[in-house]
Each structure stands twice: as structure tokens, then as C-alpha cells.
Image (cartoon, rainbow, N blue to C red):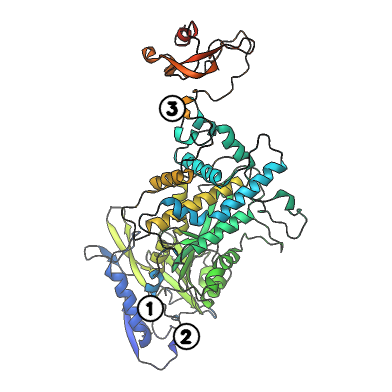
Amino acid sequence: MLTDENLDSGPSCSKQIEEVSHTEGGEDLTIPAEQSTSTTNVLSRTSSTDTCHNIRVPSPETTTVLLSDTDSSDDEENTWKKVLFPQKPDLDSFDSIPLQSRQFFPSRTRPVSYFSTFFNEDVIELIITQTNIYAEQNRSRNWTPVNSVEIKAFIGMIIMMGINPLPSIDLYWSSDPFFRNNEIAAVMPIKRFTKILENLHLNDNKEMPSREAPDYDKLYKIRPFLELINKACQNNAKNTTSQSIDEAMVKFKGVSSLKQYMPMKPVKRGYKIWTRADSATGYVFEFDVYTGKRDDNTTEVGLGGNVIKRLTKKLVDERFQGHVTFDNFFSSYEIMQHLYDKGIYATATVISRKDLPHFYKKSNKGKNLKLDRGEMKWRTKKNVAFVAWQDNKIISFLTTAFHPKLDKTFCDRKQKDGTKKAFQCPLAVLQYTERMGGVDRFDHLRSTYEVSRRSKKWWLRLFYFCVDLCIVNSFLLYTTNKRVHNPLSQLHFRLSLARGLINGYTSRKRSLESEPQYLKKKPKMSTNIQKKIGVDEDIRLSNVGIHRHEKIETWRRCRMCSTKTNNKRSKIQCSTCKVALCVVPCFDLFHSSD
């Protein structure tokens, strides 16, 4: 039993003030009067409504098991003690600022306007300049410099391709109507699209430092682009008071020193991107591509605290007051205390770190703790609390926001007979579950209609990631805009965005209606091989009665009998197949299977 005699007196408990006795789970806990009010508020607030993720206050009909923390037999420790927090955070303030845009958007603002705040004119100008420079440096054949309108149309096309994915790009221009997408094919010919994709570039290769140079950057080819997107993400939305930090994976199986192997992740091979996002919506405020070894000959593996410091630096500069959640890869006592000293509350899981309570380290990371389900052991050190709670297995947390003894709730667990039983658990468990999923929410929205495609260029996957990031962030600002009634789904938002970027642009010299249904050059064949017609047989041979003669203005080569050595031309074409044919005998031969 935990009483006044084995509860060490901390700095906040040494004041000569009136004490109020609370009873929890059969044991008395002595709490200073100045903290008793806030404790009662926390417990009453937790009990007022049911909570999500199977964690809630039990109803009278639910079997309830109240279990106390069984730590009265633990050895005394010099640094980690059973004392109350000196701080008293206002838990309601962690949800006081939801996601909201820094700019004013009227109710009828089109999706392209939201997207343009992220993919702004600076980004477009960077792509135009560097793409034209790269094409000139490589002396790309038949190259025509790109402009702003064409680049926006190009981005719109790849967004449409993400909505309607096909195995290869050329199928969007296929003569087979099953694959062909007229809305994409009408923007530009496939040769122009692939030419832009071939020369797409984001930084000048001639100015790239050598690998031996002290200022060498592994991300040089895409660094200016990443900085512009990062800046736009931070400038377009106000910081929310609840954020999470986690890693996002970008799939890539090619050759790159940046590629990571994560066998336990859904995306096992690819680029690792540290991400800070809003806990509730998944809006990404800041991201950082993991590059492995750094200039000081150390790696970020095992040094997750450095990642937390980098991603929270701007929050510290803005005097951010809120809560940040992250997992055991980043957590340690030092980083938790560092964030608290900077005014940021935090909660994180923890598994194996040096500076943890002695009872946890000597029990093989909690595996040898003999606790019943719902029991816990806890300690505090300065402003950081450690708690090991027994669920199906031991789960350990570090927190500066939720005291494990004062802030408690209940969680339902299904039994073997199908009934549910409520077990006591620290409030930190509930709050971690609710606030940790920000990056996962972003990943879910990104992967639904992602624009990414296979490429031999290692940086192109990161470019596609940034395009998806801008779409998701603009979609979240759109859906959280209270002026918008009946908002679009992400599917229709992306489609409207793509059409807005294309905006009726076409680089074709003639319309699709006057174009034949073949776009590829005929392959070279020997004379003893039957000539390929170029029109699918399902169209050419079905409903022959609807195939009629149609006069055209210019002479075109007969699709049936014209060859390199015998050029035959006609002013008659089939009204359905849209190919030129001699009236006799080619027209009948073309539409027969013999």
C-alpha cells in the first residue's frame, strides 16, 4: 500500500499547506491541497464521456477491476522517486488550437487555389529554370523550353494518373479504348510528356560540390525544392497544440545510399522521412529526409533525440505551448526533460534506455515484473514520469504531462468468454493512443491516390512525395475550412485540382477527333509477316455496318496497302476507325477477318 510514509516528498510537497486525502484502489494517497482541485478535475473530466480506442470509463453494467500500483516493495532509488509533479499542466489546452489556415479562403475557393499556396510560383519557376538548363546541358533533341502553363498541366496530368493508375505511361495514349484516357491524351502527345519527364530537374548539376567537399549534400539534386515545400507547409497553417513526430517511408527499390531497409514496416525498402504532423488531421508542418551518416561521423540510428530537437526547433523559437507525442525510437529521459525546459509537454513510449528506473532495468525491460493486468509501477525524476503498465504485456511510457498516479482512466478488454472487463490504466495510455497517429493519418491520405511511379532517377520518388504532401495538406486546409459546406472527397478534390492545373491547356496541333487511333510507329517487319493493322480487332471487325466512307481534307497514306516502297494515299477514311483507306479494295479488306 502506498501511504504518506513511503511517498517521498518532492519540491512541490514540502510546502506547509493543508493536505487532502484521496483513496484510489484501496490505498491512501496524500496530495497537497493546491493540487487536489486539479486532480479532481482531471478525474471528473476523464469520467464524463466515453473515450475512443477501447479506452473509457466503465458503465455500471461493465465489470470493473480496480488495481493499485504494486510498488511498495521496490527498492529505494536515488534519482527516480515516488513524488508528484512540480508542474500542473492544463490538459484542455492541448486541444485548444485546431488546424486552421493562415490565409482567408472564401467558401467557393477552388482546390487549385489551396494547392497553389504550397506549389507556389517560386516552386514552378524553380522547375522551369532547372529543367530548361538541364535540357540545354544534355543537348536534348527536339527540345522546346517549358513554361509555367505547361508545367502546371504536366503536374495535373500526373495527378490524374494517380487517380487512374495504369501499368505503363504509354497506355494513357493507347489506341485501345479500354486503356486510353482522352482527358490526359488531349493535353499533350506522349512524346512531349516523356520528353518533359526525361529532362525534369530541380538543381544545376554543374554547381554540385564534389563528394570530398565539406559542403557536399546527398540531397543536392532536390534540396532547393525540399526547402521551398517545407517553408510553405510551415507558413500556410498555424501550429496546433497537439502534434506527433514519426517516420514516413517512401518506396524505392533502386540504387541509392539513402535507401533504408525496415523489415517490420509495410514499405520495407525506401527513403526514411522524419515528419512532424498535426495529431488530429495529419497535416505535415515539417519533414526531414534521413541521409544517414553526418559530418561529425555519427549516425542518426539510436540518436532519435537529435531528430526531435531539429523538428521542434521552430516550435521552440515560436514559444510553442502544447503537447508532442513520439515513439520509443526517439524517447529518452534527456529529450523529455529538454522539451519540458523549452516549454513543450511530451508523452512517448520507451523500451530500452540507460536512464530509467532501477526496478525496470533489473526486470529485463519489464518482462520479469509480476503484475496483474491493470497494475502499474511508476517513478518520477524532476519533471518526467515513468510508468510501466501491464496490459497483455508490459507497456512503458515517459511523460511530462500526465502523472501516472493522479491521471487515471479505464480501458475495456475482451475476455475469452466474449464479455468485456474494464481495467484501470494511466491517462497517458489513452492520450498517447489518441495523439500519436498524426503521421499515420497523413500516410493513409497520401497512399490512397499517390502520384508516385517507378523511376531510375533516385530523387524522383522524393519529388512525387512532395507533390502528394502538397495535395494532402491543401485538402486538409480545405476540409477544415468552416466556410466550406459539403466539402469534396479526396478523390473529387484531386480530380478538380488536376483539371484546374490543366485549365484547358493543350500543346496538340490538331484535335483528337481528327487523329487516327494509332500513335506508335509501325515496327519493322519482313515481307512474309502479316502487316499489323493498328486498330483493335474488336473495333475493326464488329458492327461492320456502321463503318462508312468519310471524306477528309488532306491526302493520307492508306492504312492497308501503303508501304515504304509503294506510297498509296487517299482522301477517304473510315468514319469509325478514323484511318485512311482506298475505296477499292482496301476498305472492304480492312473490315474483314479473311
Disc sitting over residue 1 in the figure: 1
Q: Is residue 453 above or below residue 287?
A: above
Give how far apart the Cα atoms at labels 2 and 1 are.
Answer: 19 Å
Residue pointed to by mark 3: 178
Number of dots carrying numbers: 3
Does label 3 or label 2 sit earlier along the sequence? Answer: 2
Judge depth for marks 3 and 2 and give the one in front: 3
- Is residue 397 in sight in this rendering? no
Question: How dense is the environment of label 1, judged by Cα within 10 Å: few (below 14), some, or many (20 and up)?
Answer: some
**Three-letter residue code for mark 3:** Phe
Q: Locate residue 501, reporting x and y percent.
A: 48, 46
Q: Locate residue 426, reporting x and y percent.
A: 39, 69
Badge 1 marks a residue whose secondary structure is loop
Badge 2 marks a residue whose secondary structure is loop
Badge 3 marks a residue whose secondary structure is loop
Does label 1 or label 3 sit earlier along the sequence? Answer: 1
Does label 2 or label 1 sit earlier along the sequence? Answer: 1
**Three-letter residue code for mark 2:** Gly
Outermost residue toward the left in this view = 61
Mark 1 and mark 3 in contact? Answer it, CB < 8 Å: no
Q: Quadrant of residue 150?
A: top right
Q: Locate residue 217, reporting x and y percent.
A: 69, 56
Question: How dense is the environment of label 3, judged by Cα within 10 Å: few (below 14), some, or many (20 and up)?
Answer: few
In-front residue for pair 490/199: 199
Query: In this image, 499 relative to 65: left or right?
Result: right
In-front residue for pair 260/426: 260
Question: How dense is the environment of label 2, judged by Cα within 10 Å: few (below 14), some, or many (20 and up)?
Answer: some
Outermost residue toward the front in this view = 553
Mark 3 and mark 2 in contact? Answer it, CB < 8 Å: no
